[in-house]
Image (tube, grey):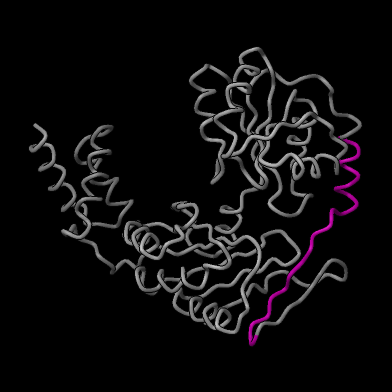
Amino acid sequence: MVRAMPERPARRHGTKSITAGKKSSTLQSRPVDKSARNLLDQTNQDTSTSKPPAGLYIISTPIGHAGDITLRALDMLRNVDLVACEDTRHTGNLLSRYGINTRRIAYHEHNGERVRPGILRKLKNGAAIALVSDAGTPLVSDPGFKLVSEAITNGISIIPVPGPSAPLAALVSSGLPTDRFFFAGFIPSSSAARKKIFQELADIKASLIFLESPRRLANTLETMADVLGSREAVIARELTKIHETILRGPVAELASYYLRDAEAGVLPRGEIVIVVGPPPKSQSMHVSESNSKETDKLLQTALQNMGTKDAAKSVAELTGLNRRDLYSRALQLLRDAG
């Protein structure tokens, strides 16, 4: 049974309730309350205008609700020398909301090779630069990785300023296990590539987190149900925004729900995070030919940093495969390598 999110009670202001078939979901906007606004105003008045130490500041920004930005993030964005962002207009709207006019420069996947050397040069000359994405935490499915990697190579300080993250927000509201999770990023667009990814991840003993396009959601869930079988899953859409919805249920039932909507010409909108629960304990616990190549890669990586017993234990915890089988396989790999 597909279950909608009923947790939060409706408010008189900034609240919208929607009923889809037999499912009801309370969808809310979240205006900044007066106490938070007063604290923000006081902080704006008291914030030091001194420049922060030189370095690259990885700053998280809201994934939807503008009030989710942290006070430290606002302080840094106000006082750094430069803000590198995916879209200067999008980030400019956020900054202007809080009276911040720090100079901005576009840095994204299409201009990164050209712009990155200039940013690194400024950093080496002692600049304090903020890196932000359009929403959420930079480097989580965004183009900041190369900049951070090259900054580290050049001895530049990297300072995280944590905050909102759509994958983590979806995970903690999913009701699925949070002690071990695997973030797989965006799902490939082709059906063959999607199936391959799900097959590769099928034996990982952890909750799986994906990002997906609304127009591909129904087909993705259908493939997921075929490959991953009967698992609980959550579809988190438009998190922290006015039309936020969280649907829970078995993957196959969620697939049927969205396929019916697609056939009726109704497609979901907005940004979507999929969280899938770990495999049942009864599911594939022995090393077999079908997963031996991936298992060997995991064992070889683990053996580079730990002993045979610990390597087998680590891979067993990650995949759910039998530890004795993995230990025997690790010994064989060592003999073959020797």
Q: Residue furthest bottom?
A: 22
What residue appears at the point 65 percent right and 42 percent down from the top-left corner?
133
Magenta residues, start to end: 21-43
Determine the residue located farthest toward the top in the rendered image.
125
Q: Position of residue 202 (x, y in %)?
A: 34, 61
Q: Is residue 83 left or right of residue 152?
A: right
- Name the quadrant containing residue 143: top right
Residue 233 vertical position relative to residue 312 in the rendered view, above or below? below
At x 84%, y 57%, the residue is 31
**Residue 79 location, quadrant:** top right
Q: Nearer the viewer, residue 225 or 322?
A: 225
Judged left or right of residue 14, residue 283 is left
Describe residue 78's horizontal placement relative to residue 282 as left or right.
right
Residue 60 in percent (x, y) is at 66, 41
Q: Nearer the viewer, residue 312 or 53?
A: 53
Check the image and report above or below for 325 versus 21: above
Q: Position of residue 234 (x, y in %)?
A: 53, 68
What residue do we see at 52% from left, 17% from top?
154
- Number of marks present in the image shown: 0
Residue occupying image coordinates x 40% and y 62% = 194
- Viewport quadrant of the C terminus: top left
Magenta span includes 42: yes
Query: Would residue 251 be counted in the magenta stretch?
Result: no
Residue 202 lies left or right of residue 105; in this view the side is: left
Does residue 101 lie above or below 49 as drawn? below
Task: Residue 97 in the image: state x and y as whole percent.
Answer: 85, 44
Q: Which quadrant of the structure image shows residue 264?
A: bottom right
